[in-house]
Image: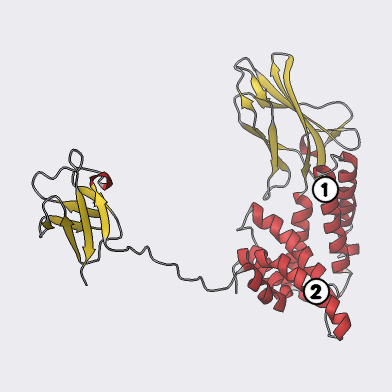
Amino acid sequence: MPITTPNFSTSESLSSNNLVTFSDTSTGDDILLTSRRISILLANGKWLDTGGVESTTIVYHTWAIGDASVEINLLTKSTVGLVTVDWMTGAVDTYTKTILCEWDLYDYVFLFGLLSTQTSYPARTDNQGYWQNSFKMITNLFQSEQAVELMDDLYSSQASLDRNFYMISKQSNFF
Amino acid sequence: MPTNAIILSNAPIASVLAGNDISKGSLYGQRIDPLLDQKIYATYFVIKKIYDLNPNYSGITAACLYLWELMGKYGIQAQAYSGGGSVAVPGTTNRVFFPIYITNVDFTTATFYPNTSIAGNNILIFMNEINRYLVLPEFTVSASGVTINIDGFDAINNTYNLIIEKVY
């Protein structure tokens, strides 16, 4: 019996934001399949390799056909990627599915860290433009998620996250 | 203090209420932080995401309590909308109304009539086929129902009409 609906989902680890888990949510079964492979296209046209390394040539991450899910060390910052999973029969790409995926927990954890500091030092809210820049980061996050959910727009979503990444990397200027 | 879940369920409402108050504040001249509704929402936005992924995440309670303080009186007011913080209304018990008219069809075995509401009541059982009340130990009452102990009673193969009455 063939796979009737090839599909997958991804999730990012809250405790280790660099780890992304891919889970096969396909319906149907194809006993002839021999492997899966994952490729992730970034907004800058490069391909995402392990450890956040970007490659100008396509990178495939292997996903054993017997494993319902696979965890890969992918990220060094919040990232949006056009993820393609291929279900292979030998060297033949039998089924394929592409989904625009967002992994933005780096930003949430950073904002939560700021909030945790506030719980200890609430006087900080009165200086350094804390709230103004928090609003800006949260708005960027919102825009990034909406760009994925409503617009299927890889570039706009990553651009929003990149604005946050700049604020995180220069955080002493903003918070 | 409310639980983290209650704080988070009330925060969006508190943001709305704060926004309303800010609008009226400019009219009535009250002293209020014009960014309070945005601060409540921004704080909620971050905490909610983390809480949904892991409600036991390190620091989540401190962050929720910080949000609760930020919500201030609007957190209290929000509970009027959400119901959070109120006392649960006592539910009605499963009352049974006597007399109970049953036939052999109501039995699940040859002798057992299931009804969890009867136990605790002082009852009489009138059996139409013998034209009299059953006397103990011709029936027994348990938490799960009533068992008829008359010799030869067989609700599977015979027809019966019984009336269960409560004696006060």
Residue A147: horizontal and vertical position, in percent? 85, 45
What is the three-letter code of the residue carrying label 2? Asn
Q: For the residue labelled by badge 2, is the local secondary structure a helix, a strand or a loop? A: helix
Q: Is residue A175 visible?
A: yes
In the picture, the disc for residue B28 is none
Horizontally, residue A30 falls left or right of residue B120, namely right
Residue at figure coordinates x 71%, y 55% from the top left: B49
Q: Report the mark closest to the observer, 1 or 2.
A: 2
**What colouring does the structure picture have?**
secondary structure
Residue B152: horizontal and vertical position, in percent? 9, 43
Residue at label 1? A146
Q: Chain of mark 1?
A: A
Quadrant housing the C terminus of chain B: bottom left
Q: For the residue labelled by badge 1, is the local secondary structure a helix, a strand or a loop? A: helix
Residue at label 2? B20
Q: Chain of mark 2?
A: B
Q: Nearer the viewer, residue A55 or B138?
A: B138
Residue at figure coordinates x 89%, y 69% from the top left: A129
Horizontally, residue B78 falls left or right of residue B31, namely left
Decide: is B151 above or below A91: below
Horizontally, residue B92 falls left or right of residue B51, namely left
Decide: is A29 above or below B166: above
